[in-house]
Amino acid sequence: MAAHEIRIADPRAMFDTFSGSTLTSPLPIPDLFRGLEAIAIALITREGKLKDANRGFLLVMTRCSPVPEPNDVRGLFANPRFEDIIARTQDPFEGTLYRGLLSLGSPSGKAVSLHGSIYAHNGDLLVVAEHDIVRLETLRTTLLELQDDLAEKQRHIIHLGHRAARLQELADAAMRDRDTLLDALAHRGSGKGD
């Protein structure tokens, strides 16, 4: 099954499709977080194999081109790179290997930026990240403002089009009047010489 054929409503089926196997054992990510899309959660081995993921992380994977294989998602980490994360020392207070902006996607293709943390978890990596909702809302507000500006400009263009049509009508009428006047003068001038 291709990535675009995955049923988004069923994160377990998405993971089964990506991993190529049916999961029978309980997964590390609680069901409470499985269906979330604004938050991406994944458990990845240090070798880069995807062990578990919620819908948000799987959606990020499907937006990448080419879609990474679940057996090796190292290439998904554009910045910081997966190798750089593995090489980091765990923060003794927070338990994080990394905290900050994560760019996921192919270096030559589309990347998705998320804010999040990567934790060391039983020898694996636990990725917990979220889409920047404030930034999305700001972009949405900006888009709405631009749409309003565009609508205003379109109304102005329509008004100018009507005005130009009216001016063209007046110019045509003036040309007809001029032609009529020239014809009258021509007939008058030809009548004097008789």
Image (cartoon, rainbow, N blue to C red):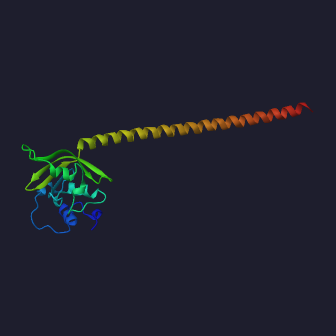
Q: Is residue 144 above or below residue 53?
A: above
Position of residue 96 in the picture relative to residue 175 (left or right): left
Quadrant of residue 29 in the image? bottom left
Residue 62 location (% of width, % of height)? 27, 58
Q: Is residue 1 above or below residue 111?
A: below
Residue 179 in sight here: yes
Image quarter in which the N terminus is found: bottom left
Residue 96 location (% of width, % of height)? 11, 47
Residue 149 location (% of width, % of height)? 40, 38
Q: Decide which of 8, 21 is in the foreground and name it.
A: 21
Image quarter in which the C terminus is found: top right
Instruction: Name, please, the residue furthest toward the top.
Output: 192
The mark total stands at 0
Position of residue 59 in the picture relative to residue 179 (left or right): left
Residue at 46% over, 41% down: 154
Residue at 17% over, 63% down: 12
Position of residue 8 in the picture relative to residue 148 (left or right): left
Quadrant of residue 48 in the image? bottom left
Instruction: Name, please, the residue furthest toward the right.
Output: 194
Residue 105 location (% of width, % of height)? 27, 53
Q: Is residue 137 above or below residue 43?
A: above
Residue 59 in sight here: no
Residue at 11% over, 68% down: 24
